Every structure is written in C-alpha cells, then in structure tokens.
Amino acid sequence: MIGIGSSGLHSNGYSLARRIIFGELKMSVGDYIEEFGRTVGEELLEPTKIYVKIVKKLMRDFRIHGMAHITGGGLTDNVPRMIPKRCQAVIDASSWTPPPIFKYLQGAGKLSFKEMMRTFNNGIGLVMAVEKEAVEEVISRLKAMGESAFHLGEVKLRGKRKEPVRFVS
C-alpha cells in the first residue's frame, strides 16, 4: 500500500478540531501558530487536495488494485473498504511523519493514537494498493509529479486477527 500526502485536514474531523482549537484552547482564526507557520484560520481553510489527475497518470502504467480517499473515519475506517473482507491492511505508522496540525491536535486534545487514526487523515489523503513489485516505481513516479508518497504497508490474509487494519511501527 502506498500513501499519498494530504494538504491538511481535508474533510476529516472538523468537529473535533473546532472543539479543541476554539472550545478548549479558546483560540481565534487570526491566532498565529508557530508550528504551522501561519494562522489557525489559514491552516483550517487549506483546500482539500484532489488526486484524480495523478491517479489517471499512474493508471496508464500500473495496475491499481484498490484506492481509498482518507476522509471522515480516517485510515481505520476507509482502508478496509478497498480490500477483501478476508484480508487485513498492515500499516507501518512510522513510514511517514504527519504534518504539524495533527500532532498539535493530538497533544492539545489529549487524543489517543487510535482516536487520531479513526478521526483524521494524519497526513495521508489517498491510499493505493499496487503490486508489491511496483511499489518503489510508483512512489518514484509520484515524487516526480511533486507528491509526497510513502510505502505504508501491505495487505495480508487476516488469519486469526479480527481487526481489518493493524498499525505497527
């Protein structure tokens, strides 16, 4: 599985983000956050990245077995929709570094890793399943197109494990 970087929150977890930022922290849209390098409003209004053009280019040369746009429900709920029920997605949580907004929300909201993965995209906007032999070439192609891309993990038969997504690091 390959993860393509998001441009920010996209459409993930805005209710929770608003509760933390405006409710608990009592911030306003004009407050500047050093970690973001911009204001709260600028960070929250970052447009959602659209992946259709890059996916179309990749589909010319590679077989894509599944795709999941990581929207509400995060990686935990969206990735299982692209794999067979008898399989499990094993995601290496150390294979990418989430943008600062996610670490900020996790710390300020005292959110668990599980809650973060279920609510936010954590910097991964799209996940694609490709042949194992094509992973490095697809990542290289994505980077040549100006995208951030990561080898997230793999799809395995579920076996005795019940959860459709398992995070390792």
Image (cartoon, helix red, strand yellow):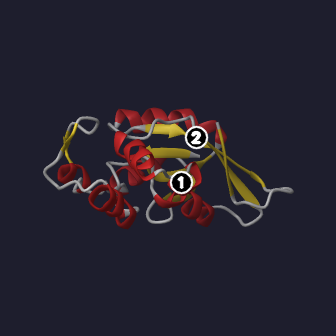
Instruction: Check disc 2: other Cα within 10 Å, few if <14, some if 14-19, many if 20+.
Output: some
Q: Is residue 56 visible?
A: yes
Residue 93 marker: 2
Q: Is residue 114 above or below residue 97?
A: below
Residue 147 marker: none
Q: Amino acid at mark 2?
A: Ala
Element at label 2: loop
Element at label 1: helix
Residue 148 in the image: state x and y as whole percent: 40, 38
Q: Is residue 54 above or below residue 77?
A: above
Whether tag 1 and tag 2 are in contact, CB under 8 A, the answer is yes
**Residue pointed to by mark 1:** 117
Residue closest to the eye, 38 or 133: 38
Q: Which of the marked residues, 1 or 2, is nearer the chain's N terminus? A: 2
Residue 90 in the image: state x and y as whole percent: 68, 47
Q: Is residue 5 visible?
A: no
Q: Residue at x 58, y 40 (%)?
A: 93
Q: Amino acid at mark 1?
A: Met
* Left or right: 135 as drawn, with respect to 27: right
Position of the C terminus, as image quadrant, is top right
* Left or right: 41 as drawn, with respect to 130: left
Residue 48 in the image: state x and y as whole percent: 30, 57
Q: Residue at x 46, y 35 (%)?
A: 97
Residue placed furthest toward the left: 30
Residue closest to the eye, 162 or 62: 162
Q: How many numbered marks have been drawn onto this rendered protein structure? A: 2
Q: CA gap, disc 1 to disc 2?
A: 10 Å
* Left or right: 79 as drawn, with respect to 141: right
Q: Is residue 68 above or below residue 128?
A: below
Instruction: Check disc 1: other Cα within 10 Å, few if <14, some if 14-19, many if 20+.
Output: some
Q: Residue at x 30, y 62 (%)?
A: 23
